[in-house]
Amino acid sequence: MSQSSNTTSSTSVRLFTNVYLLLLLAIVIKYLPIVSIPFEWLESYFHEISHGIAALLSGGHIVQIQLFANGAGLCTTRGGSPMFIAFAGYFGAAIWAMVIFSLANVHDKISRVLSYLLVALLVASIIFWVRDFLTLFICLILVGVFALSIKIQHLGILKGVLQLIALSVVLSAIKSPLYLMDNRAIGDASALQQMTMLPEVVWILFWCGFGLFALYRMLRSAHTSKLKTKAKAAKGAVS
């Protein structure tokens, strides 16, 4: 009984430490109607909080963050740099993905601390910027996702769960800007076009390109980490 349990746990750990399997899983999840919903909410949250952080950094403040059932979101800000705020959504989401992935890749303890910090950020968002019941409900679900990740850390898959979330966010950062090519003249790219006179497509391609760069960096860091782990194991075996 104990041996079977250990085998199952070991298999789960291997699955959740293979970054390419995680990437494939993140892609598949996007096409699963119910399973994909929390991931879509997370992607939207990181996009909107990036707008909000840009407002705070440029001297403005966040009025309200809204998340919708369909995965869309809205961050209402006042003051700050309109250009920086509009630019930060997709760009910031890719940054969040890289940071979460990289930190989770360092050590299990770092993964645990990171989960607590993300819970704290969501709780702060609820306290200061959530004004409607639906967004409150969604944020509480997201808090539950990270709390559950912490709860099951003994299974050795917390790192994998965080990296799966990061991969899902970066895939969204690559794909979502393409939806702005709809000739409706709304959205972040349209706002930036009006402020800079650069066509929407320039901003869209930049965001998609940066998302691809972020994904490359994440996969490369995972590969480098795996090589270091193998080298340490080999060195330990020799000694």
Image (spheres, rainbow, N blue to C red):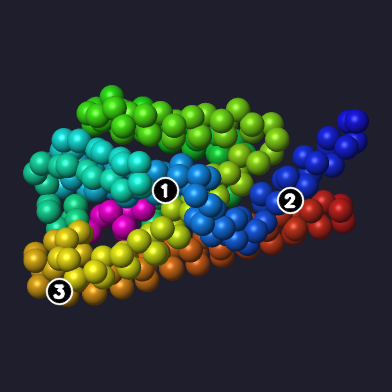
| Residue that label 1 marks | 40
Residue count near mark 2 (Cα–Cα under 10 Å), binned few <14, some 14–19, many ≥20: some
Indicate which label's residue lies in the foreground, 2 or 1: 1
Task: Please tell me which residue is depicted at 15% across the width and 42% down the height of the picture.
Answer: 77
Query: Outermost residue, top direction?
Result: 127
Does any portion of residue 167 appear in the rendered image?
no
| Residue that label 2 marks | 14
Say whether residue 6 is left or right of residue 162: right
Badge 3 amino acid: Leu
Q: Which mark is residue 198?
A: 3
Characterize the magenta stretch by its predominant secondary structure.
helix
Is 225 contained in the magenta span?
no
Sequence-first disc among 3 and 1? 1
Task: Please tell me which residue is depicted at 30% across the width and 40% down the height of the picture.
Answer: 67
Q: What element carries label 2?
A: helix
Which is more toward the observer, 27 or 143? Answer: 27
Indicate which label's residue lies in the foreground, 3 or 1: 1
Classify the position of the N terminus by image quarter.
top right
Q: Distance between the residues labelled 3 and 2?
A: 46 Å
Residue count near mark 1 (Cα–Cα under 10 Å), binned few <14, some 14–19, many ≥20: many
Q: Quadrant of residue 223?
A: bottom right
Badge 2 amino acid: Arg
Residue 175, x across and y down, in percent: 39, 64
Are discs 3 and 2 less than 8 Å apart at CB?
no
Q: Distance between the residues labelled 2 and 1?
A: 26 Å
Residue 109, x across and y down, in percent: 59, 35
Task: Please tell me which residue is depicted at 10% across the width and 73% down the height of the picture.
Answer: 197
